[in-house]
Image: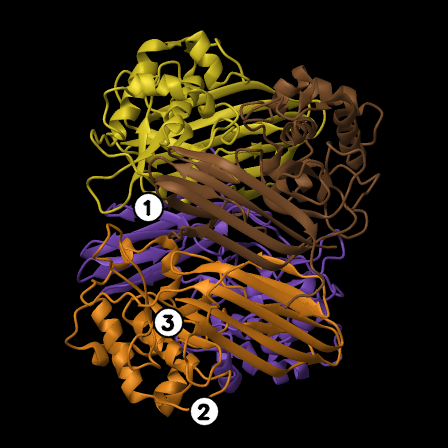
Chain colours: A purple, B yellow, C orange, D brown
Amino acid sequence: MRLDAGCRICFEASAPSPLILMLRPRSGSGQWVVREEYVFEPGVPVVEYTDNYGNLCQKLVTPEGAFRVVTAACVETADEIDVQLGAPFVPVQHLPNAVLQFLLPSRYCQSDLLGDLASEIVAGHEAGYDQVEAIRHWIQTTVEYCYGSSDSSTSAVDTVKSKVGVCRDFAHLGIALCRSLSIPARMVVGYLYELELMDLHAWFEAFVGDRTRSTEGRWYTFDATQKELRGNRIAIAYGRDATDVALATQFGPLQLVDMEVWVKPADLETP
Amino acid sequence: MRLDAGCRICFEASAPSPLILMLRPRSGSGQWVVREEYVFEPGVPVVEYTDNYGNLCQKLVTPEGAFRVVTAACVETADEIDVQLGAPFVPVQHLPNAVLQFLLPSRYCQSDLLGDLASEIVAGHEAGYDQVEAIRHWIQTTVEYCYGSSDSSTSAVDTVKSKVGVCRDFAHLGIALCRSLSIPARMVVGYLYELELMDLHAWFEAFVGDRTRSTEGRWYTFDATQKELRGNRIAIAYGRDATDVALATQFGPLQLVDMEVWVKPADLETP
Amino acid sequence: MRLDAGCRICFEASAPSPLILMLRPRSGSGQWVVREEYVFEPGVPVVEYTDNYGNLCQKLVTPEGAFRVVTAACVETADEIDVQLGAPFVPVQHLPNAVLQFLLPSRYCQSDLLGDLASEIVAGHEAGYDQVEAIRHWIQTTVEYCYGSSDSSTSAVDTVKSKVGVCRDFAHLGIALCRSLSIPARMVVGYLYELELMDLHAWFEAFVGDRTRSTEGRWYTFDATQKELRGNRIAIAYGRDATDVALATQFGPLQLVDMEVWVKPADLETP
Amino acid sequence: MRLDAGCRICFEASAPSPLILMLRPRSGSGQWVVREEYVFEPGVPVVEYTDNYGNLCQKLVTPEGAFRVVTAACVETADEIDVQLGAPFVPVQHLPNAVLQFLLPSRYCQSDLLGDLASEIVAGHEAGYDQVEAIRHWIQTTVEYCYGSSDSSTSAVDTVKSKVGVCRDFAHLGIALCRSLSIPARMVVGYLYELELMDLHAWFEAFVGDRTRSTEGRWYTFDATQKELRGNRIAIAYGRDATDVALATQFGPLQLVDMEVWVKPADLETP
């Protein structure tokens, strides 16, 4: 399904402030960016670069006063997410080198502290995809989704205790539990069609075997906030956890005063 | 000046053919992509990846029959190209490591064979920017621009002999002469506003000192096909020479049957 | 001073275990590896690759039973560490893109939680090198060095509370405090000549301005475990924090049963 | 077999000269560097960096006068080169992205000009490994090895005409012919045990399918200078052709006055 998605962010700065944005979805095997738009008001010089995870980042200095960012993209998305029950665990020695970093603990995903819980959750499940699905299901049924229940310092360990959180907390917990079983896991932020309470969304991916093609393995999508896996997602950024994929990282007296997000079916015709 | 630029390429394949395209301009310090569009007819799965030079490449397999690619971009461009007469030569040991590769000879830029000619051309000029400008001027006044005078196998050495060529040959010769003086040089393909006989264009960049900021050096734009350096350029791809920046590299029975290129001032309003 | 440094690590595995080692110092601007040796007993196939931070990593599967790793290097080191009192803070927009990742919080360096403490510590100091030195001095005089006082889960926030730790904790705290002031900081593990209680050592680097050369800035060495900054260091690995620079990351029933580290003046003659 | 290999290069500079060396073999899946040594006389500051092909490069400025480089390595090598008759051609769309660059023509490997010759040579052979072996065999039996018969400007097209060359010319021709059939090919320089007239050696690798493991393909070793494929090789550098893998690239009045190369079975004991 072709989606029109975008966001409008309004900042207010009491002094010029460096800002790093990560708001440009990339075309890849899973999605194709048919049309895209990215505007700053007022216009400022921008440097765009690629980070360690392949994300396109925009570095700029906002002027004093109001600063508005508008991005919009028309993206061809997959209607169905690939599900591979039974896809096997990939032993560490067979993982691609670039995937190994997603085994390590990170700021919000203290996998080194959650090994016992993970083993309990996946008991009886086959190593690989089925373990990740068991983790996803456990989070979905155990942690309560509650808007405003956590903040930017909340980590997977916090969520295990509080049993409440938002999409980013659900993803952090899923990632931490996977990594504690030596399954690489990474965070994704992006758009999801028909998300209740429209906003940017976060979910996670895990790297397990691929039974349909002759490769060691691949990334699969998981989303613990949803009862059923739903397609029509647009990934904007990938990383170890929320620190790597912040859509806006600011370094000055800058306030986000308003934000609007939209995701809707694309208009039928392309010019 | 904000430009609307794009191209429409029509292929005809007698059998499915792998194709690598390089048609997506990137935002950077010199240009900002405000809006972009990239469509295939019929639609096919595409993998996009970044090559060694930072270009976004699209890998796909065309179906049998007609295949059409349309890309369009609205890009904020610089009206004036930076000129730095007197900017000094950067000694090899001070060049950034990533720039060193642009000192080496390549398929169409046999810098190892053109040292004597280069020395002759730049005699009396200060090492650095002024040498590159002398090279550019020499090519501009010595080589005749003649559409259809060369083909895809023509190299800088061939052009020295024939004294005739198209934009790609002018760029190759400029690059080869710079490298023979240990000045890093690279090829750029892209759009140029008000190019006579509208088509995709090729020019080159050379890396010399920067007198205005506290860095070792930077890339400067040169174009030996023009009497005067003109701005309003959109770079699409960078590389050692034409092999690296081919807008379409094909691996099958695929024929380019038609191609249209446009560059015009952008419509005033952005939606 | 030319140093002979190395380590011998003995593992015991109850079953074959994947293991990633990071034990090969690289030559760079600050150190030159004159001679090096790297042996496994028994011999096993090894894949070496470079991670995101430029470290050379060795991936292997240990056999069941005893497994011994011996590395030794003869390295030319700097006798004095560069000190630059007064070197200025580099504004975020001028940092090299590859340095930006070292501004983010990480598993053991929760810079997002330590801003108030950092501001207090550096009050009255000029932004840049002097702030980092104030942080280093504060840690050195406030946190007690006590072998065995922390474990692999101890983070900078924990150390702020406990006021006790080992070299890795001192480094994590220094890094977290720097990042909370928007000064990029990274972890280093390596060898230090005449370290009391010889072992592998950890310290940190911060990125601030360079007043002696025409570049935006550079990495400077800091070590909060020492009263005075001492040279004769061999860096083995760089990263965000201890997760990235673990000399051995294991994924199986593997026990480290013995480890010996040595650092001494190199024999005068090289063969 | 464990080999002791190394070289001693003596330069003489009439003025300080920038020099880039590529003399440090890397450990990888095919070889393990047990011990290594790398010395400059007189000592100079050196910056080591990794190029686009993963080679470790050393950048320095030689002093005026004599300058000597000695490198030695003890490397565990494979006694037998992997041979895979029948290994299939990998279609371009299935090649790893990082391999695609090895399909393009380069300075000494004008694959765009040799398609007809290649088709003739491989007529009747199955696409893939067998084609590369046919190319290797054709070169081995058609081109005469003659020391001193070519120089640093000799390309594959030149060698097709002259039918004479040295190891580097044999490799360039093999690479160019492979690429013209859309088989990725790259140059390797290194040491070969029991090479007649001991010197550094050059050969090539081609990327075709892997029938023994579940991956798309892998690099295989080919050497057209030898009647039979021989093992006990130490790869030092990889690249598109000789421009990328020059063991010494100089940028000043520097003369190579003497060079000695050795490869012999390693002493039995390691210290």
Do pointers 3 and 2 mark residues of a single chain? yes
Mark 3 → mark 1, Cα distance in angstroms: 39 Å
Q: Residue at x 20, y 30 (%)?
A: B86
Q: Residues within 10 Å of mark 2 (few under 14, many from 20)?
A: some
Residue C149's disc is: 2
Q: Residue at x 77, y 50 (%)?
A: D79
Q: Which mark lies nearer to you, 3 or 1?
A: 3
Q: Amino acid at mark 2?
A: Ser
Residue A39's disc is: 1
Is residue C175 in view from this perspective? yes
Q: Secondary structure at mark 3?
A: strand
Total tally of numbered discs in the picture = 3
Do the residues bearing badges 3 and 1 touch, measured as CB atoms within 8 Å?
no
Q: Secondary structure at mark 1?
A: strand
Q: Is residue A10 above or below residue A228?
A: above
Q: Amino acid at mark 1?
A: Val
Mark 2 → mark 1, Cα distance in angstroms: 52 Å
Q: Which residue is tagged 3?
A: C204
* Chain ID of residue with mark 3: C
